[in-house]
């Protein structure tokens, strides 16, 4: 990569940079060069995807400016040259550099460095009078309740549209299948909006289609069964002679359309869609053996088998026709429901004047594409001269369409001349791992081609990593180079030392023992002994093997701290097993299970307290509060309260207040109740915890290491409470209602556990998706034999034009649906994208390691990541330096 070209503010540049190559440094360097060459700070727009990345960019910008202001002449010259400056531009920058920090501090306008969504919010505030309603649109602080409101409105609309024949659709998909299919379709709203999908036409096309399909199928079934009645009659007697064919005899006796499902279950194989050259269904193998035929049917066996083949062939064609008709009708009906859902979403958004992240993107897109958008884009034209986009491989179709709409208007008006804004995009298609959020690496390719064609953009690439050691780079080149030679170029390590090493642990065999049956309970003291399964899972065993390897590694390398280690998993499904294994070995860890914070015992105790304060008659919640470390009461008190409550028909709280020997306890609980009447939850919890004191209170949950994690979780929970509901500070009743709804919601965004910043050294246990952008000295890739879940229910398949501006095909498909040529092409494309993302996820995991990499697996499966990497790491249980 030519840094001089990449950082030149006068050029539009697209950079494809590998993991660890310094993309943030490159973005910061370009912004600094813009400032040094006279670009007004307010004319710089830098967009990224997370607040953390934006904050890092801001921090680096100010650090570099401060360093330039304080550096010696030699250091300043060296820094400016590393940014690609030379000649007259270098002389000008040397003159400007000492004062750049001060100028930016006093500047009226600062560079816009933020996320796409923060920029969209700002865009909407610029909305002209014609679409002024968008200018006050805000991001909802209650996404779960917002979605609930949309679903309620959607259900009302469904009731007003009986022509969509919802009962038939529910019968076909099931209630949960219907909701899942609709949610998946709505996750594509952005892409569909970018391609200007016609929802009104979809709604019109979905009316009565299911009823019409049902009538057509009934007619086809009637006709076929009538045409084959003589064949069925001819086979009734022969099948009565065969032993064990009572199901077939019943079908032939009751021959008619109502036997359609039964015939398929008895005679036919399961439908297949892998091989288009073979029938999807055929006669079940060995269902009627030749020995049976000869023994019972004798010379008539060929005649009877020919009749069976005739029925089977005819049925297969009929089933294909019926199922294909249902599939297309279901697809059209779901699209019509999607149109109603889209309407409901727009209505709720207008009424509440708020929306979610997807809605914010769609609102910005509708603004840009409206007539008023021309006015807005002219204002943007005058303001921004430099546009920078980070992590472009994570861009979705909506984000690129909004940016392209703006840039294309400028290109059409001015051409790709010096007055046009310069565009800088940096990304790595190999790190595109968020397809489930709508990110598509093909958008990066489309953006690169468009910028080259319309803005004369220069394309630069680099495969030099400053993160990974030579040994890890060599291992990647061997394994990933063969895995995807068309997508992976050989990497180079920028630093020659330290050399680093790779360790492959033996794959843990699958545990054949089943879980203990509930029919054979084991006696235990339920107050002191937790219930447990008799089975130790293979993931727990793998976690133990990983823990022992890490303990050994720290003995060999004493400078390797726990906080230098990161254990990455493909999914969080079995994360609890690894947590138990590490806890058993005494290894300190911090897990990023998304539901971790609200379900930790220390936070559950606070929620139980909150629940009791809201509902003081709740005996169960009071029992939980009394047994928590906040009160520290024994079971003896609970037994007394239970007995007296039953005798007096009073609540436990009333009984407790009447007990003279518990006056201090009652006084504490009464004080907390008085606080809860007028304090927001954050202040309430803060006061409760301050009565602790905190160190001794946290020690009640375990060892010192555990206590420090408890305190970190409390601090994280308090911070989260302060931000909940956009800082409106709800009371206890409203807060606990919100928490119960949040915990019950599917796919809710729940807070992660806290991180102790006071020096606790703990390894990080997290998913590969959450590790993007992070790094550690030692990385463990665990669970490498795990696979993604097989698709169930409706899968949506779409194909767009290369520039992502036109929708060419949109289909819905279930596992056993008939597959036509269009669907086969779309499924093959989806498989390619899934394989590409599978490779990307492995690449992201491997490139998190700076010095040491451990690969491990629970179970051995053909084609798994572990098997692929094992071929290039033949030595098991020993550190190997590659290269």
Image (tube, grey):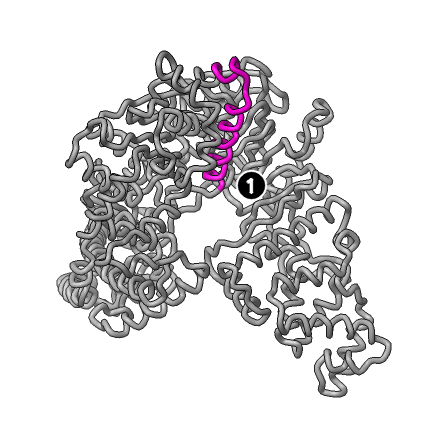
- Asked whether residue 72 is drawn in magenta, I would say yes
Is 370 situated above or below 9? below
Percent coordinates x, y for residue 815 in the rendering? 32, 50
Report if residue 466 is visible in the image.
Answer: yes
Report if residue 269 is visible in the image.
Answer: no
Q: Quadrant of residue 553?
A: top right
Is 553 situated above or below 192? above
Q: Quadrant of residue 425?
A: top left
As drawn, is 721 to the left or to the right of 649? left
Percent coordinates x, y for residue 569 in the rendering? 53, 39
Residue sitting at 48 percent across and 18 percent down? 79
Dominant SS type (magenta): helix
Mark 1 is surrounded, within 10 Å at the Cα level, by few (under 14), some (14 to 19) or many (20 or more) other residues, namely many
361 or 632: nearer the viewer: 361
Residues in magenta, as a range: 52-78
193 or 571: nearer the viewer: 193
Percent coordinates x, y for residue 102 in the rendering? 48, 31
Q: Which residue is mark 1?
A: 766
């Amino acid at each position: 990569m030519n840094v001089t070209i990449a950082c030149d503010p006068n050029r539009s540049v697209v950079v494809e940079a590998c993991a660890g190559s310094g993309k943030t440094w490159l973005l910061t360097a370009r912004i600094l060069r813009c400032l040094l060459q006279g670009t007004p700070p307010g004319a710089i727009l830098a967009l990224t995807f997370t607040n953390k990345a934006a904050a890092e960019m801001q921090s680096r910008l100010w650090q570099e400016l401060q360093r330039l202001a304080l550096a010696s002449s030699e250091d300043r010259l060296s820094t400016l040259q590393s940014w690609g400056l030379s000649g007259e531009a270098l002389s000008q920058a040397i003159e400007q550099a000492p004062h750049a920090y001060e100028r930016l501090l006093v500047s009226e306008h600062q560079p816009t460095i933020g996320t796409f969504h923060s920029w969209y919010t700002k865009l909407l505030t610029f909305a002209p009078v014609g679409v002024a309603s968008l200018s006050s649109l805000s991001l909802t602080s209650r996404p779960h309740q917002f979605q609930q409101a949309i679903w309620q409105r959607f259900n009302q609309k469904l009731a007003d549209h009986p022509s969509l024949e919802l009962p038939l659709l529910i019968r076909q998909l099931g209630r949960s299948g219907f909701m899942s299919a609709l949610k998946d379709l709505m996750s594509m709203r952005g892409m569909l909006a970018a391609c200007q999908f016609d929802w009104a036409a979809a709604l019109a096309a979905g009316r009565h289609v299911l009823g019409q399909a049902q009538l057509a199928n009934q007619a086809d079934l009637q006709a076929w069964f009538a045409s084959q009645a003589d064949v069925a009659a001819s086979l009734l007697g022969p099948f009565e002679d065969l032993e064990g064919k009572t199901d077939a005899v019943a079908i032939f006796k009751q021959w008619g359309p109502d036997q359609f499902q039964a015939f398929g279950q008895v005679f036919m194989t399961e439908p297949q869609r892998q091989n288009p050259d073979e029938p999807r269904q055929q006669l079940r193998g060995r269902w009627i053996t030749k020995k049976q035929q000869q023994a019972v049917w004798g010379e008539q066996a060929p005649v009877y088998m020919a009749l069976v083949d005739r029925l089977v062939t005819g049925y297969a064609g009929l089933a294909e026709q019926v199922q294909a008709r249902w599939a297309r009708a279901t697809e059209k009906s779901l699209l019509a429901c999607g149109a109603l859902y889209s309407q409901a979403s727009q209505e709720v958004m207008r009424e509440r004047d708020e929306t979610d992240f997807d809605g914010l993107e769609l609102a910005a897109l509708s603004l840009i594409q409206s007539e008023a958008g021309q006015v807005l884009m002219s204002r943007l034209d005058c303001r921004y001269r430099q546009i920078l986009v980070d992590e472009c491989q994570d861009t979705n179709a909506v984000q690129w369409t909004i940016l392209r709409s703006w840039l294309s208007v400028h290109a059409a008006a001015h051409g790709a001349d010096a007055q046009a804004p310069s565009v800088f995009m940096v990304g790595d298609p190999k790190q595109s791992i968020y397809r489930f959020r709508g990110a598509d690496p093909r958008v990066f390719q489309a953006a690169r081609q468009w910028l080259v064609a319309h803005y004369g953009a220069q394309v630069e690439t680099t495969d030099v990593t400053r993160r990974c050691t030579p040994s890890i780079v060599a291992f990647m080149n061997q394994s990933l180079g063969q895995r995807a030679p068309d997508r992976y170029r050989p990497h180079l390590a920028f630093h020659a030392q330290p050399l680093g090493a790779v360790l492959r642990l033996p794959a843990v065999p699958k545990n054949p023992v089943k879980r203990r049956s509930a029919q054979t309970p084991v006696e235990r003291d339920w107050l002191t002994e937790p219930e447990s399964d008799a089975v130790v899972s293979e993931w727990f065993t793998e976690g133990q093997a990983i823990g022992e390897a890490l303990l050994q590694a720290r003995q060999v390398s004493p400078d390797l701290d726990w906080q230098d280690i990161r254990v990455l998993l493909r999914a969080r499904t079995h994360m609890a097993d690894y947590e138990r294994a590490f806890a058993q070995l005494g290894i300190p860890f911090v897990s990023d299970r998304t539901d971790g914070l609200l379900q930790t015992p220390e936070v559950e105790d606070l929620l139980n307290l909150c629940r009791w304060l809201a509902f003081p008659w709740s005996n169960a919640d009071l029992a939980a509060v009394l047994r928590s470390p906040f009160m520290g009461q024994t079971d003896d008190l609970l037994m007394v309260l239970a007995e007296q409550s039953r005798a007096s028909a009073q609540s436990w709280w009333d009984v407790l207040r009447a007990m003279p020997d518990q006056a201090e306890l009652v006084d504490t609980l009464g004080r907390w109740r008085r606080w809860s009447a007028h304090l927001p939850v954050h202040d309430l919890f803060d006061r409760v915890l301050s009565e602790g004191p905190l160190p001794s209170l946290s020690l009640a949950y375990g060892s010192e290491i555990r206590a420090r994690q408890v305190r970190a979780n409390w601090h994280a929970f308090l911070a989260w409470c302060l931000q909940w509901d956009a800082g409106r500070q709800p009371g206890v009743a409203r807060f606990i209602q919100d928490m119960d709804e949040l915990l019950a919601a599917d796919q809710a965004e729940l807070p992660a556990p806290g991180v102790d910043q006071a020096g606790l050294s703990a390894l990080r246990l997290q998913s590969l998706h959450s590790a993007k952008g992070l790094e550690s000295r030692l990385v463990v890739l665990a669970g490498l034999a795990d696979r993604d879940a097989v698709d169930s229910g409706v899968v949506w398949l779409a194909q767009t034009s290369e520039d992502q501006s036109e929708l060419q095909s949109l289909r819905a498909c279930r596992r056993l649906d008939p597959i036509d040529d269009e669907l086969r092409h779309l499924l093959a494309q989806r498989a390619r994208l899934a394989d590409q993302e599978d490779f990307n996820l492995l690449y992201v995991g491997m490139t998190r390691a700076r010095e040491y990499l451990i690969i491990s697996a629970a179970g051995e499966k053909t084609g798994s990541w572990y098997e692929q990497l094992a071929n290039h790491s033949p030595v098991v249980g020993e550190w190997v330096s590659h290269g």
